Image (cartoon, helix red, strand yellow):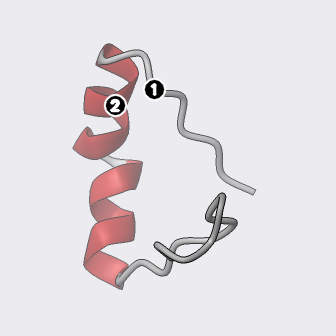
Amino acid sequence: MLSAAVPDAVDLADEEITDLLGPGAQALSDLGVEVHWP
């Protein structure tokens, strides 16, 4: 990932996905970061 100029994908574990879909998405939104899911 660090060797790419712009990362095009990030591999996440099931627990990380669950966190992002729940409180993590709200925390990111509160900071002005938009979370987009395919």
Residue 17 at x, y percent in the picture: 39, 67
Identify the residue position indicated by label 1 in the image.
Answer: 33
Q: Which of 37 and 31 is in front in this view?
A: 31
Q: 10 Å neighbourhood of mark 2: few (<14), some, or many (≥20)? A: few
Query: Which image quadrant is residue 18 in?
Result: bottom left
Residue located at (42% from left, 16% from top): 32
Q: Which of marks 2 and 1 is nearer the N terminus?
A: 2
Query: Which image quadrant is residue 38 in?
Result: bottom right
Q: 10 Å neighbourhood of mark 1: few (<14), some, or many (≥20)? A: few
Amino acid at pointer 1: Val
Assess whether mark 1 and mark 2 are in contact (beta carbons under 8 angstroms). yes
Instruction: In the rendered view, tell whether residue 9 sits above or below residue 33.
Output: below
Residue 21 at x, y percent in the picture: 40, 51
Residue located at (25% from left, 29% from top): 27
Query: Which image quadrant is residue 16 in?
Result: bottom left
Identify the residue position indicated by label 2 in the image.
Answer: 28
Q: Dot 1 lies on which element?
A: loop
Amino acid at pointer 2: Leu
**Relative to 29, 37 lies left or right:** right
Residue located at (49% from left, 81% from top): 11
Q: Nearer the viewer, residue 8 or 4?
A: 4
Q: How far apart are marks 2 and 1 (CA)?
A: 5 Å
**Relative to 30, 17 lies left or right:** right
- Judged from this view, the residue extending furthest toward the right is 38
Q: Nearer the viewer, residue 8 or 6?
A: 6
Residue 9 at x, y percent in the picture: 63, 71
Instruction: In the rendered view, tell whether residue 23 sits above or below residue 8.
Output: above
Instruction: In the rendered view, tell whether residue 28 sits above or below residue 5.
Output: above
Q: Nearer the viewer, residue 28 or 15?
A: 28
